[in-house]
Image: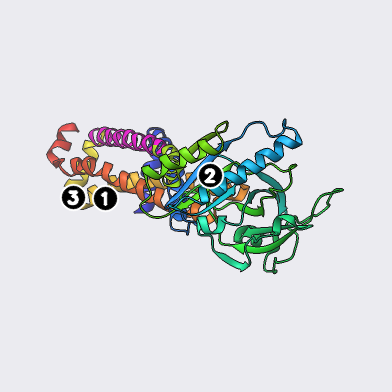
Amino acid sequence: MIRHLIRLSWNRKRSNALIMIEIFVCFLVLTGVMTGAAYYLANWHRPLGFSYENVWEVEIDYGRYDAASETDRQAIIDRMQQVRREVDGMIEVEAAALAVNTPYSNSTNSTTMVLAGREEDVNMGAATIELKDVLGLEIERGRWLEAGDDTRAWIPVVINQKLAQARFGNEDPLGKPVDPNPEPEAGEMETRVVGVITDLRRNGEFSASPHLAIIPARLGDVEEYPPDRLLIKVRPGSGVMFEERLVSVLNRVAPEWTFNVDSLLSSRERMLRFYLLPLLVLGLIAGFLVIMVGLGLMGVLWQSVTRRTSEMGLRRALGGTTGAVRGQIMGELLVLTTLAVGLGTLVVLQLPMLGVLPFLSFGIYLSGLALSLLVTYLVVMLCSLYPSWLATRIHPGTALQHE
């Protein structure tokens, strides 16, 4: 039966070529959308690594630090410390920390390291020791940053599990330098791992965890840029009134600075929309494409059945059942679909082999392929129902009239 269906499809290869191209293109677009959805869904079920509830962020603009004199730089650092102390003294505040590379922010300070034989970006964030309590970070091994770390002759570093695995494999990273090829220049301080935290997905639930390293903010060194973000953990129930009081305190302590106050909850919602918008746009495009291809398939099949009235009627006259006639129409379309999606599958499988989009695992590609195959075959089957039903309604007498 399958050989017969393939032969019938081959005999009408010119008319079937357009159908195969439509299914092929539709399958590729569907695979892209489904792979993205599978990637987001897999990330959504992983632990976030930090707590965003009841956390506020203050973005601080203290002016051109690089153009300031040493005296002005020291004044900026002292004022920054005063801002943190004043905020920490507010009755609603449980903890406050200065940091860079904060969650849901567009601020990223990264460096390039050779990990597992290839160059990778590593987020290098400086923070005060209160960051652990503000974000609820979990220590997997070693310790967190502590008082006095910013004055050591070497730089203590806390890394996440992803960086620990990529850099050290199964070895114990504690006490070892982060840079796999340490060639310190004159005056450059050595970095040593003092702790490992769980993976922290700073861009939210739909993102993957970056390679992350956190060092103490060296507020006593005027050559180092002070952190420009203040993260504040507040007591539950602190809302608009707290925001107004916070802005008042900030403007009183540093009236010449500019502050942008927002909650991590609001930043999280914006980041979720940022990730979902491209997928929704592609989903709408894929949806319209599927509808167009489906309508095209129905039209082509209806025209094919109309032209093959004598063939269908003769088969009914020879004892063919309605199920057999319907199976022939649907089977021919399934053969074309299998050829089209088979070629599309070969194209998609080349992507992980060539290292395209390396952040996508092979399992994600397979999940996207499986979902695309399911949707494609489901749409094709639905589109073939009405034309195949029309074929079963052809009476043998009608076929004789055509003859």
Label 3–label 1 contact, CB within 8 A: no
Residue appearing at x 60%, y 50% in the figure: 353
Q: Amino acid at mark 1?
A: Gly
Q: Residue 203 appears at what percent x and percent y?
A: 51, 47
What residue is shown with label 3? Answer: 322
Residue 81 part of the magenta-drawn span? no
Compared across the picture, whether 398 is left or right of 174 comes to: left
Circle 3 sits in a helix, a strand or a loop, which is it? helix
Q: Residue 370 appears at what percent x and percent y?
A: 42, 53
Q: Residue 258 appears at what percent x and percent y?
A: 54, 32
Circle 2 sits in a helix, a strand or a loop, which is it? helix
Nearer mark to the viewer, of 3 and 2: 2
What residue is shown with label 1? Answer: 327
Residue 289 part of the magenta-drawn span? yes
Q: Quadrant of residue 298?
A: top left
- Picture layout, residue 86 above or below residue 47: above
Q: Quadrant of the N terminus?
A: bottom left
